[in-house]
Image (tube, helix red, strand yellow):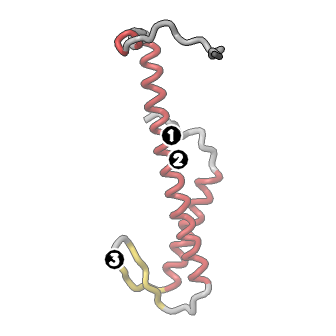
């Protein structure tokens, strides 16, 4: 008969015995701080991805307007559609894209992940 070379634990701890470790207050505060910062990081990443998607839609709309014929266009704002001139919409898209470029080029050191 062949026996296993791995050692079996001589005693299995009960669930009550496993959780007897005490966590120091400063360690718990660091764990909580990490949890808050990690959650904030995920929120910021999600917000950035949503802003990038919005910027891409504006850029696509601007490109689409360049191929237009100069007549009035239908614009969706929320759930509402309205008709306006192509020039006004083009100016809006260009201004929005310029603001996005300025924001993107500025250093982000003034932003903090702390709520």
For label 1, the residue is 41
Q: Toward the viewer: 30 or 111?
A: 30
Going by the image, does 47 lie left or right of 98?
A: left
Going by the image, does 42 lie left or right of 62?
A: left
Secondary structure under the numbered disc 1 in the rendered image? helix
Q: Quadrant of residue 17?
A: top left
Q: Toward the viewer: 38 or 77?
A: 38
- Name the residue furthest top: 10
For label 2, the residue is 45
Q: Toward the viewer: 52 or 8?
A: 8
Secondary structure under the numbered disc 2 in the rendered image? helix
For label 3, the residue is 80
Residue shown at 57% from the left, 76% from the top: 62
Image height check: is 13 above or below 48? Answer: above
Distance of label 3 from label 1 (alpha carbons): 33 Å
**Camera-side mark, 3 or 1:** 1
Residue shown at 43% from the left, 84% from the top: 74
- Name the residue furthest front: 1
């Amino acid at each position: 008969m062949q026996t296993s070379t791995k050692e079996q634990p001589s005693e299995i701890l009960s669930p009550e015995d496993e959780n007897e470790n005490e966590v120091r207050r400063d360690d718990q505060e660091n764990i909580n701080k990490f949890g808050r910062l990690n959650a904030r990081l995920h929120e910021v990443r999600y917000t950035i991805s949503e802003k990038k998607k919005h910027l891409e839609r504006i850029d696509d709309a601007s490109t689409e307007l360049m191929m237009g014929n100069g007549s009035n266009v239908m614009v969706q704002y929320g759930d509402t559609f309205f008709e306006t001139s192509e020039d006004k919409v083009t100016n809006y898209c260009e201004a929005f894209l310029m603001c996005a470029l300025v924001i993107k080029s500025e250093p982000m050191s003034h932003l903090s992940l702390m709520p």
